[in-house]
Image: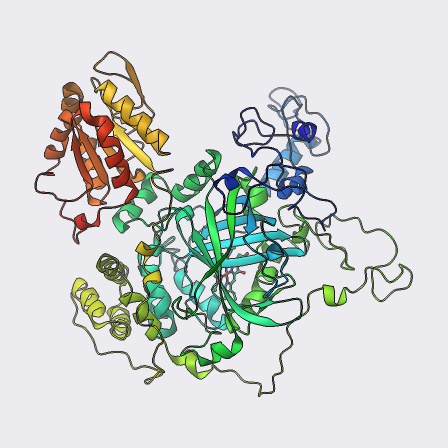
């Protein structure tokens, strides 16, 4: 297989490419025990590979790479050609009659190039247009055969290749990453028994209960149709008009207005399948199930002021973060957990499990970890993979089935349908990123962009001319769970669907005080952008039903009185099993990642103290942080020892919102120069306001004072002072403070700094 790897085309710009010198690719054929730390260094092996897919994967090679290999293009040391493979001699000049004469129609080279260019764009996704994706694998902890025959859970340590795409919902393809929004969390499992897509969000509930309302919801949140504004924002009249008239949205509004609506990174958010699904075992017995992804990097969020500023400084903030982490070998991981419960248990719940605006509290049904996903390879080509990947909730495999959730039903239709416009026809399953590893044999034929060469004269079933093949798989195929239903044909909802507030209150009451304050501030911000007073008032009247304190806080922020509560559709609901759930607070999942991949800025100027900064740089880098020297400009600076320090970022090109922590350097001359630069104060002020850790070394403490921060009166653990000589002792203290993510005792509304 060494030869095989060597023969593979590779992208020389990618450090993590297989076959590349110094590649970060996993060692050949290594197998890791589930749960061991070396897991990140393993991919598919003969043993755990996909046996049913026309051969096991090559050792050390992720099977998705093999399936994409035939379409990878490597142009190194190759001549330019047309799409017909004809070599192009001149790529600069049109064919003309005379140097100053007219261009000739016969210039097929020009025409092919321009024509192709003219058709480069495809329609963007109608929602979730903005996204980023990566390859990886899922590894099962234990066989789950008691509950499901689904291939990925067939045996302990079994590995299934995946492709995961994260997205915002409302913004267009080129919009900013840090908008307040739900985030898509879609995972395609290339299983032995066909593709399974788990198309979820980072929020476990949805705005609406019935797919019938989806176009209305999306029309309301998208830019208003008359003037096309605002982009990637829910803070406008049509959205709040709609949701204030749809009290079933209230629970999800609480989540989106919480800090979960502005994650720090795609790597640091949870994922949820949202709907109740079914698991089905070999005997055809089924249980209900909810899917949860838990990031092993911890769950962390931005602050709103920070998110707004990042959207200007780096609209690709989340895309860059995911890409860079994977390129550097810091492979993000999520644990998959299941909430499993029976239909009988579900009947006893105070809420309806077919209602996607409700969670099943973890205190009622615990989450059982069943496996782990690792993303370890960036796509080769954004368009071919991230843009063309087609997730469909209808893509399930034997062992996974649907519940009767009416929102899910509409989705089962919508996703396949939308790809036909977006990807130009019914053969999108043949686009390499979408094609299953499991073999595809059926009698579907033709259509736009058909790739498969179906052989023989038979394209129907039953047949005798092809020996009856391909034949029906019977019990080894997908068999829907039988369900006896005798009822009226009706447009309506079950009774428990009419209760809209109990779980919104559960969510709010389960938050820490800081999180509650952020929720109130988010409602205030969003509603302050609403121009029609009646909409603000209606939304406030709905919030009264969630929490009078919340409604009062938001009303105060809008200069309004608290209105009367909105009449409830279901005045006397069954009492809830759970009234506070710590799992709903973001603070509940701190993660195990320390300061790995955290971005730390060390300010530099001419005359900066050399020894202390180099020591600190090394200590932090060793702990896995990404440390940048940030100057008034990029380039070389003379330190106090005469040695050079190179600034790879400038305060102009990288304001402090892009970093997780700040170091103010020692060195009198440097500090004097930094003091005179307006950018320095902005830099410090934002780090302070956003509750991040600041370490001031020696004379650098002057800069804190200059910025109006008095460390003596400030008791928070995120402002650290040290002499340059004490850097070695201070480094672990600093690391601990950065790992805390934020020092929220500093958080105030409005900000004091
Ligand atoms: Fe959806 C895309 C998640 C309800 C119709 N949806 C889309 C994506 C995600 C979700 C993550 C992007 C997939 C990707 O990365 O390509 N959607 C959800 C969740 C929902 C939900 C978690 C509620 C539980 N969606 C929903 C409904 C409908 C749709 C009710 C229609 C009836 N969603 C679509 C779509 C999209 C889509 C129009 C746009 C692009 C695409 O499918 O491929 O079909």
Residue 676 visible in this rendered orientation of the protein = no
Badge count: 0
For residue 425, what is the image quadrant?
bottom right
Q: Position of residue 708 (x, y in %)?
A: 10, 38
Q: Position of residue 388 (x, y in %)?
A: 58, 48
Look at the image and name its color scheme: rainbow
Looking at the image, residue 4 sits to the left or right of residue 355; the answer is right
Q: Give the residue at the far left of this rendering.
A: 713
Q: Give the residue at the far top of this rendering.
A: 642
Q: Position of residue 723 (x, y in %)?
A: 16, 26
Looking at the image, residue 146 sits to the left or right of residue 202; the answer is right
The residue located at (86%, 59%) in the rendering is 458
Residue 220 visible in this rendered orientation of the protein = yes
Work out whether 622 lies above or below 526.
above
Quadrant containing the N terminus in the rendered view: top right
Quadrant containing the C terminus in the rendered view: top left
The residue located at (40%, 66%) in the rendering is 362
Q: Give the residue at the far right of this rendering.
A: 465
| Residue placed most toward the observer, 363 or 697 | 363
For residue 547, what is the image quadrant?
bottom left
| Residue placed most toward the observer, 569 or 532 | 569
For residue 233, what is the image quadrant?
bottom left
Looking at the image, residue 125 sits to the left or right of residue 69; the answer is left
Work out whether 30 lies above or below 200.
above
The residue located at (26%, 31%) in the rendering is 731
Q: Position of residue 401 (x, y in %)?
A: 60, 67
Work out whether 499 lies above or below 226.
below
């Amino acid at each position: 297989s060494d030869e095989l790897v060597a023969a593979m085309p590779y992208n020389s710009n990618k450090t993590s490419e297989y076959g590349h010198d110094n590649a970060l690719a996993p060692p050949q054929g290594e197998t890791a025990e589930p749960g061991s730390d070396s897991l990140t260094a393993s991919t598919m092996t003969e043993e755990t590979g996909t046996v049913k897919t026309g051969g096991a994967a090559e050792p050390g090679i992720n099977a998705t790479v093999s399936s994409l290999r035939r379409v990878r293009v490597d142009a190194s040391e190759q001549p330019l050609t047309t799409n017909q493979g004809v070599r192009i001699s001149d790529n600069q000049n049109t064919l003309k009659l005379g140097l100053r004469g007219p261009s000739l129609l016969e210039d097929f080279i020009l025409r092919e190039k321009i024509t192709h260019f003219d058709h480069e764009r495809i329609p963007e996704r109608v929602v979730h247009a903005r996204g980023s994706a990566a390859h990886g694998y899922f590894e099962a902890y234990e066989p789950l055969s008691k509950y499901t025959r689904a291939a990925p859970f067939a045996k302990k340590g079994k590995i299934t290749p995946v492709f995961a795409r994260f997205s915002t919902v409302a913004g267009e393809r080129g919009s900013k990453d840090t908008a307040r929004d739900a985030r898509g969390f879609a995972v395609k499992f290339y299983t032995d028994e066909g593709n399974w897509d788990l198309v979820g969000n980072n929020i476990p509930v949805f705005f609406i209960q019935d797919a019938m309302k989806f176009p209305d919801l999306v029309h309301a949140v998208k830019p208003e149709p008359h003037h096309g504004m605002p982009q990637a924002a829910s803070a406008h009249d049509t959205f709040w008009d709609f949701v204030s008239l749809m009290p079933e949205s209230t629970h999800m509004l609480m989540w989106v207005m919480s800090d979960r609506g502005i994650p720090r990174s795609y790597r640091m958010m949870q994922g949820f399948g949202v709907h109740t699904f079914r698991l089905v075992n070999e005997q055809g017995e089924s249980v209900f199930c909810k899917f949860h992804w838990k990031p092993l990097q911890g769950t962390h969020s931005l602050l709103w002021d920070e998110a707004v500023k990042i959207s200007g400084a780096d609209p690709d903030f989340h895309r860059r973060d995911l890409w860079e982490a994977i390129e550097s070998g810091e492979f993000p991981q999520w644990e998959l957990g299941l909430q499993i419960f029976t239909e009988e248990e579900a009947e006893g719940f105070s809420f309806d499990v077919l209602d996607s605006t409700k969670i099943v509290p973890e205190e009622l049904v615990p989450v059982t970890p069943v496996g782990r996903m690792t993303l370890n390879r960036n796509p080769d080509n954004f368009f071919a993979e991230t843009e063309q990947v087609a997730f469909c909730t209808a893509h399930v495999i034997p062992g996974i089935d649907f519940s009767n959730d009416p929102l899910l039903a509409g989705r089962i239709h919508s996703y396949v349908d939308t790809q036909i416009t977006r990807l130009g026809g019914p053969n999108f399953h043949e686009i390499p990123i979408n094609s299953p590893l499991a073999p595809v044999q059926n009698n579907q034929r033709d259509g736009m962009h058909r790739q498969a060469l179906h052989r023989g004269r038979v394209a129907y079933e039953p047949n005798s001319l092809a020996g009856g093949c391909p034949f029906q798989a019977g019990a080894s195929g997908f068999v829907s769970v039988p369900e006896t239903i005798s009822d009226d044909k009706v447009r309506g909802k079950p009774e428990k669907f009419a209760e809209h507030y109990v779980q919104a209150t559960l969510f709010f009451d389960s938050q820490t005080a800081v999180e509650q304050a952020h929720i109130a501030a988010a409602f205030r911000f969003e509603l302050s952008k609403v121009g029609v007073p009646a909409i603000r008032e209606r939304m406030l009247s709905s919030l009264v039903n969630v929490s009078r304190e919340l409604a009062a806080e938001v009303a105060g922020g809008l200069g309004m009185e608290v209105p009367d509560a909105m009449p409830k559709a279901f005045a006397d609901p069954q009492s809830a099993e759970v009234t506070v759930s710590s799992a709903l607070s973001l603070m509940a999942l701190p993660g195990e990642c320390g300061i790995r991949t955290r971005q730390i800025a060390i300010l530099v100027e001419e005359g900066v103290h050399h020894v202390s900064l180099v020591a600190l740089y090394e200590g932090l880098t060793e702990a896995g942080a990404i440390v940048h020297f940030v100057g008034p400009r990029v380039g070389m600076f003379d330190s106090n020892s005469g040695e050079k320090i190179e600034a790879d970022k400038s305060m102009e090109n990288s304001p402090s919102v892009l970093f997780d922590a700040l170091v103010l350097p020692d060195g009198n001359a440097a500090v004097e120069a930094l003091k005179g630069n307006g950018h320095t104060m902005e830099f410090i002020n934002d780090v302070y306001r956003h509750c991040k850790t600041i370490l001031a070394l020696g004379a650098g403490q002057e800069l804190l004072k200059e910025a109006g921060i008095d460390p003596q009166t400030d008791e928070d653990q995120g402002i650290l002072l040290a002499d340059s000589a004490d850097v070695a002792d201070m480094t672990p203290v600093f690391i601990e403070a950065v790992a805390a993510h934020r020092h929220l005792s500093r958080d105030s509304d409005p900000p004091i700094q």
